[in-house]
Amino acid sequence: MSINLSNNRSVGFRACRSIRTVGRLLFAVTILVVLEFSAAFANPDVWVQTGMTFRFEDGKVTGVSYDWAFDEFFSSRTIASFDANGDGELEPAETVRLRREAFDPLAEFSYFVHVWEGDQKRNELEIESFGADVDEGLLVYRFTVALSPPVDPVADEIIASLHDESIFVDFRFREKEFLLVEGTMDPGCKFRIARGRGAQSGHRQAVSLYCGG
């Protein structure tokens, strides 16, 4: 599947989810609740509808923004835990606490974000911004992963994917406007979405971007 995007698009915000795993999963609800699981654990417990935005500046990709919209069950429990005043919204102070207790611990797992520049995987990803809100009852995270130095898609293919190797969290693109561009992208650039192979084996929806003609 190939997609050509040449016009500027703004980030679509619908997204979210927060969990961690390492022989155990630290699940985000009032605090991270410990859930034990076996290595053979194969069924997801959290479902996330997501979107992805590639940010361009001077022809290079400076970052990738993500939005995660969680399933109803996870959303309701997490909102109830962090919405201190019970108004059904997440105020700035409540969002700060949610990030500290539920999102930041995911750094151990690179926030389930995987980015390759050519054959080289980007490690130690930096979160440039983070926000959370409630959209039609669903908890939504939106955050940007900075790429420093920026990636030149003419010189190297960029591959980005959301993937939880434990299969505890199921990431899937939402139905509409799930792949966007912010900034100016060369009309010759092409996106390809496909099941990953090789280093991306097991990744259901790996997104490749290449502008090399």
Image (cartoon, grey):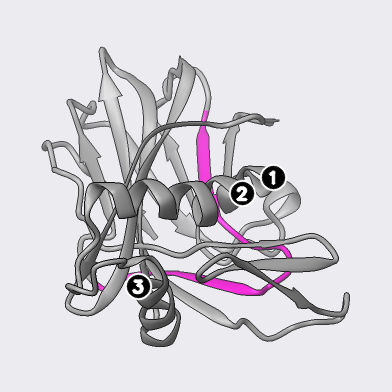
Between the residue at mark 1 and the residue at mark 2, the CA separation in whole angstroms equals 6 Å
Q: Give the residue at mark 3.
A: 79
Of label 3 and label 1, which has the lower sequence position?
A: 3
The percent coordinates of residue 41 (x first, y second) are 79, 82
| Disc 3 residue type (three-letter) | Ile
**Mark 1 or mark 2, which is nearer to you?**
2
Q: Mark 1: which secondary structure?
A: helix
Q: Is residue 180 above or below residue 51?
A: above
193 horizontally vs 45: left or right: left
Q: CB of mark 3 within 8 Å of CB of mark 1?
A: no
Q: Nearer the viewer, residue 179 or 142?
A: 142
- Please say if the residues under marks 1 and 2 sit with CB atoms less than 8 Å apart: yes
**Mark 3 crowdedness (10 Å alpha carbons): few <14, some 14-19, many ≥20:** many
**Label 2's element?**
helix
The dot on residue 108 is 1
Residue 126 or residue 147, whichever sits in front: 126
Of the residues shown, which amino acid type is indicated by label 1? Answer: Glu
Residue that label 2 marks: 105
Residue 186 screen position, x and y as percent: 23, 26
Specify the segment rendered in magenta. Answer: 157-175
The one nearer the camera, 213 or 117, is 117
The quadrant of the rendering that contains the N terminus is bottom left
Give SS at disc 3.
helix
Q: Position of residue 200 (x, y in %)?
A: 67, 52
